Amino acid sequence: MLAEGIRVTDVNPGPVDTGYWGDRTVPWDKFLSPLDVARVIVFVATTPEHMVIREVNVDSMAWLAK
């Protein structure tokens, strides 16, 4: 894929405040927002063409501090 100029990045977000969780009791204040994840994707997508970011792991500081 790189020979064709296709770059692939694996974005691995921690828990995100979305409808996925339904009515479960979860620590919403520790979750990432969809905007947080979107900002990471925009960052990756706007890196120079000679760079490849292969993987990004994103978590909330509040989630990691537990």
Image (cartoon, rainbow, N blue to C red):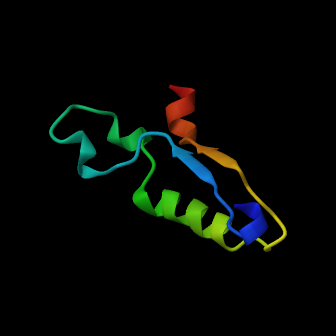
Measured as percent of width and height from the top left, residue 5 is found at 73, 71
What residue is shown at x 56% (from left), y 30% (from top)? 64
Q: Is residue 36 above or below residue 31?
A: below
Residue that protrudes farthest toward the left in the picture: 23
Residue 12 % position (x, y):
54, 44
Task: Residue 42: name its quadrant.
Answer: bottom right
Which residue is drawn at the image coordinates 26% and 45% (left, top)?
20
Residue 44 x %, y %: 66, 64
Q: Residue furthest top?
A: 66
Which of the image's four quarters has the N terminus? bottom right
The answer to whether residue 36 is left or right of residue 2 is: left
Quarter location, residue 58: top right
Q: Is residue 64 above or below residue 10?
A: above
Instruction: Determine whether, in the image, residue 48 is placed left or right of residue 39.
Output: right
Nearer-the-camera pick, 48 or 13: 48
Q: Can you give x and y, in whole percent of width and height, for residue 66 in the image? A: 50, 25
Nearest to the observer: residue 7 or residue 37: 7
Q: Nearer the viewer, residue 52 or 24?
A: 52
Is 43 situated left or right of 34 in this image? right
